[in-house]
Amino acid sequence: MIIYMYYIKMCCLEIFCCLSKCCIDTSHLMYDSKSFLAEKISEKIRKHPISSSEMDTIRNPINMNWSLLSSSEKNEIQKICKNKIYITLQNIEKTEFVSKNILKEFTDRDMNTIVDFIGHQINYNLKCCIFHYFKNDDETKYKYTEIATPKLNSLGDYENIRLLSINLFKCTYTEDFLSEFLILKDINTKEIKTFDRTPQELVDCEKLHEKYFTIIKKVCEENNDYKKIIIDSFDYLDNEKKIYNTIVEQNKNFN
């Protein structure tokens, strides 16, 4: 009986928390829709950074991995991206849509679906830009051109878009990135030092992590693809819906 009552209590608490969150989200959405949308989109970027497997730094002898981001660092990245997305949504609202109401463009479709879709697309784009950070030639440096083909999981939600990989884990671009990233130069003596991807010393690991986090912040701040990705995402999903409706119409008379 005690266990049963405890279970009921926990269920009620969980329901209460869900309802509270729903009320807070609704209030935020009505008060500042662009801020709310930017926050929800940027959450995908916070949740799915480049993994240590993709960066091939997982075999670490000192149990400190320079390619892992702390919670506070992820929060900082999300804050940068949220601000960029917020400004982008303001611009899109003024220049792209007849309604001049960005929230309406989301709610006229499936808001959760398009937020999820855009978040994964921007995150994938930023990852590619990070891995191509050291390339200078316009023909080799990553440039966004089109939507990455998304996949749906068993629940119908969009999955994190995986980078091209060699063995399902390590990214195809990892070696090119590390060949430049692991080389550091002393600003005073100009001495060159090449670090190991899995440092043996804590101080070396900290130095690589500092450089890595700086690159991520810079890419998120300076990326110019946010607007095109958001516009392309609307167009992609609208086209997918059109194709679906066309097929439904064609199949209507088949028994």
Image (cartoon, rainbow, N blue to C red):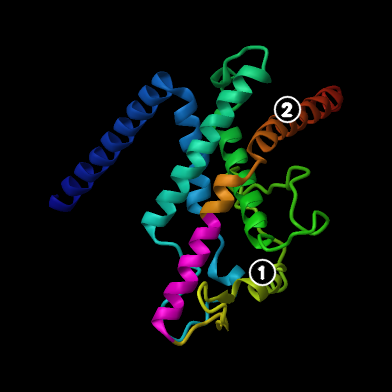
Say which residue appears at 38% left-offset and 29% top-offset: 25
Q: Is residue 48 visible?
A: no
Q: Is residue 13 left or right of residue 224?
A: left
Q: Is residue 137 left or right of residue 170?
A: right
Q: Which residues are magenta?
A: 201-216
Amino acid at dot 2: Asp
Residue 96 is covered by the magenta coloring: no
Say which residue appears at 66% left-offset and 55% top-offset: 129
Q: Is residue 165 left or right of residue 31?
A: right
Residue 214 is covered by the magenta coloring: yes
| Pair 1/2: label in front | 1
Q: First in sequence: mark 1 or mark 2?
A: 1
Say which residue appears at 67% left-offset and 76% top-offset: 179
Tell me, for residue 161, which label it has, or none: none
Say which residue appears at 56% left-offset and 75% top-offset: 184
Q: Which residue is mark 2?
A: 238
Tell me, for residue 177, which label it has, or none: 1
Q: Is residue 226 left or right of residue 200?
A: right
Quarter of image, res 70: bottom left
Q: Residues within 10 Å of mark 2 (few under 14, many from 20)?
A: few
